[in-house]
Image (tube, rainbow, N blue to C red):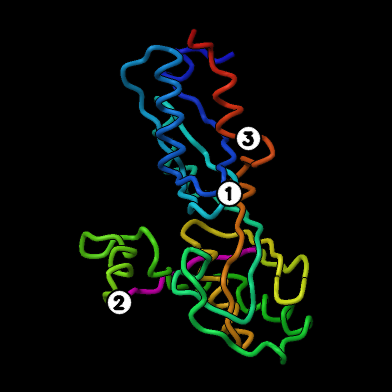
């Protein structure tokens, strides 16, 4: 069992983030539980890469002195699995907002779907979603979006080393992506729909790996908390 000194000296915690939790909530919850279990007044806790509330999977959380390694972990390659839905787009590129535009899909074949993945392998220019936490002029982009304000977003270069469609189930495409820091899978969904002369949005997302850290080696928040010393 980990001790008070272990957490203060620095731990890397692999957490399987539940659906609807924000990354901030996960960090806050674990920080509170660690402080409470060991009667620690103050401890640094942070995460190495945000996951959207509608995404699940690997959240690398660092405590104590290991928080100095957060930037290193954030820069490592990431792997995701999930589902795109063809034929419709949403303002947020995922299910945070409702479908506002629909497109024909009759022309789309399995061959066309698999061929389209090749357009996204390597270094590509990508526009982040307007519904994102990136900052412009001191405000989060999603603040502009929710207020209905127009905002100019600049593209940025990201790298996708692997992109495969693992299953085609009608208009649902199951995928696996290996990509660099800063890649938005929601934007990939939107761009992939355009590549098929249709529309698409992200309906499910799971982060399975960051560098050498794998989600199957992680714990749910409940499992992690259950392993802390009893508070009685």
- Taking the spot 78% from the left edge, 81% from the top edge, the residue there is 110
- The reply to whether callout 2 and callout 1 are in contact (CB within 8 Å) is no
Q: Quadrant of residue 116?
A: bottom right
Which residues make up the magenta segment?
150-161
Whichever of callouts 2 and 1 sits on the residue coming sooner in the sequence is 1
- The reply to whether callout 3 and callout 1 are in contact (CB within 8 Å) is no
Numbered label attached to residue 56: 1
Q: Position of residue 64 (x, y in %)?
A: 40, 25
Q: Considering depth in this image, is 4 or 91 the residue closer to the camera?
A: 91
Local SS, label 2: loop
Whichever of callouts 2 and 3 sits on the residue coming sooner in the sequence is 2
Q: Considering depth in this image, is 130 or 65 the residue closer to the camera?
A: 130
**For the residues marked 2 and 3, what is the alpha-carbon distance in whole angstroms?**
38 Å
Residue designated by label 3 = 218
Whichever of callouts 3 and 1 sits on the residue coming sooner in the sequence is 1
Q: Position of residue 161 (x, y in %)?
A: 63, 63
Q: Quadrant of residue 80?
A: bottom right
158 inside magenta stretch: yes
Numbered label attached to residue 152: 2
């Amino acid at each position: 069992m980990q001790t008070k000194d272990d957490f203060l000296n620095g731990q890397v915690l692999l957490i399987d983030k539940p659906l609807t939790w924000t990354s901030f909530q996960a960090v806050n919850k674990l920080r509170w539980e660690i402080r409470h279990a060991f009667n620690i007044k103050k401890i640094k806790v942070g995460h190495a890469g945000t996951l959207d509330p509608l995404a699940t999977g690997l959240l690398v959380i660092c405590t104590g002195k290991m928080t100095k390694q957060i930037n290193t972990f954030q820069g490592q390659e990431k792997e995701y699995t999930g589902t795109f839905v063809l034929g419709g787009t949403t303002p947020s590129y995922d299910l945070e907002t409702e479908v506002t535009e629909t497109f024909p899909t009759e022309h789309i074949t399995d061959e066309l779907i698999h061929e389209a993945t090749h357009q996204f392998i390597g270094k590509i220019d990508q526009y982040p979603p307007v519904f994102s936490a990136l900052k412009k002029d001191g405000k989060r982009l999603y603040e502009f979006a929710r207020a209905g304000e127009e905002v100019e977003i600049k593209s940025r270069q990201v790298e996708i080393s692997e992109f495969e469609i693992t299953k085609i189930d009608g208009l649902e495409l199951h995928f696996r992506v290996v990509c660099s820091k800063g890649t938005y899978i929601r934007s990939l969904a939107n761009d992939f729909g355009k590549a098929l002369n249709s529309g698409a949005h992200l309906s499910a997302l799971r982060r399975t790996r960051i560098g050498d850290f794998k989600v199957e080696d992680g714990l749910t928040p409940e499992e992690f908390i259950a392993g802390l010393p009893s508070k009685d």
